[in-house]
Image: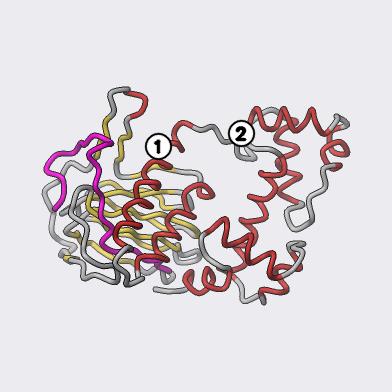
Amino acid sequence: MGLKAACVQWNELTPVVSYANLYTGDPGGSFGPRYIADYQFILVVSGKGQAVIQSAAYEAKPGDLFYYGPHVVHTFTADPQDPFILYGIHFSWQAPLPARGGVKAISVIEVDSDESPVPIPNTMMIKSDKEEDSLMLGDKQSLHLDRIEPRFARIVELYRMDYDYIPLLLRSLFLELIISIKQGEQLPHLGRATGSPIVRLVAEKLHRHAEDKYDRGWLETWTSYHPDYISRVFRRETGLTPYDYFMKEKLALAKHALIHSDEPLARLADRLSAASIHAFTKWFKEHTGLPPGKYRQWSRMI
């Protein structure tokens, strides 16, 4: 069952994941117009395209999270030159757990493109006694991909496992996902385009050197300041140490290569200055929930 109202308290959440997958869009391909019988999150992890939710059209780019509920008509269309890759999770906000994990049937209803469906409210408020702790979800929110993608990947990985404990595990992971969405509103993060000039300089240099092995001496070379001072300034403005920022850039390179090329894993590990293929695999899985080979395989599934 789903919620009858568009709000719920945090402590009333009893979500159930009913379907989860990774979708690779064909150039210019689309799904919809359609609606579903439950709720869904769609996360864009690479590429681009367009999302239409009821009558509202949105650009769909990496880090964009789309949300809609039952009977909300939606269409997603991949860009002809740079088609998107999406994570999708079907779920209920409040429902009893199924007895066992594994693939479940879902209800998807195609809609005649000439129809004009009646608009349906499409917001969800997860309420708290403290207003700042509440979370409002609407058609689209933009998130920091590095923070949110590993949670989607883990849910997708576990969804297909046919064990008694999987529904409970998926519930806990989904709750973590929702909380991380809320925390993403509250925790600061700085991209390369913002911040003080010295932080922008260091961020851009770290981005350019992401294939290399990290060298703390870079900070002094690039700025003429002591590395400790630069680290404090960088962390104050970004919420990340220079090293953590650098490793996120390296992870982004690894993901891009796995999705967009057939570069052998050993060669990729060497190019990214990993100590060994074993170390690269362990590091990648720790940060994405998937080993690199499986990440590549799933990024190309339809």
- Residue at 62% over, 33% down: 238
Q: Amino acid at mark 2?
A: Gly
Mark 1 nearby-residue class (10 Å; few <14, some 14–19, many ≥20): some
Q: CA distance from mark 1 to mark 2?
A: 17 Å
* 51 is higher (above) or lower (below) than 194: below
Mark 2 residue crowding within 10 angstroms, few (<14) / some (14–19) / many (20+): some
Q: Which residue is mark 1?
A: 182
Residue 156 included in the magenta stretch of the image: no
Residue 299 location, x and y as percent?
A: 48, 69
Quadrant for the C terminus, please: bottom left
Q: Which residue lies at the image location 64% right of the left edge and 37% below the top edge?
A: 240
From the viewer's perspective, tell me whether residue 81 is left or right of residue 13.
right
**Amino acid bearing label 1:** Lys
Q: Position of residue 270 (x, y in %)?
A: 76, 68
Numbered tag placed on residue 116 in the rendering: none
Task: State the residue in front, 138 or 266.
Answer: 266
N-terminal of the two: label 1 or label 2? Answer: 1
**Residue 153 lies in what quarter of the image?**
bottom left
Vertical placement of residue 234 versus 138, above or below: above
C-beta proximity under 8 Å, tags 1 and 2: no
Residue shown at 29% from the left, 64% from the top: 19
- Find residue 79 and report its horizontal and vertical position in percent: 44, 62
Q: Quadrant of residue 164?
A: bottom left
SS assignment at label 1: helix
Q: Is residue 11 above or below residue 282?
A: above
Name the residue beneath numbered marker 2.
239
Label 2: which secondary element:
loop
x and y, in percent, of residue 190 in the image: 60, 36
The residue that appears at 52% across and 68% down in the rendered structure is: 295
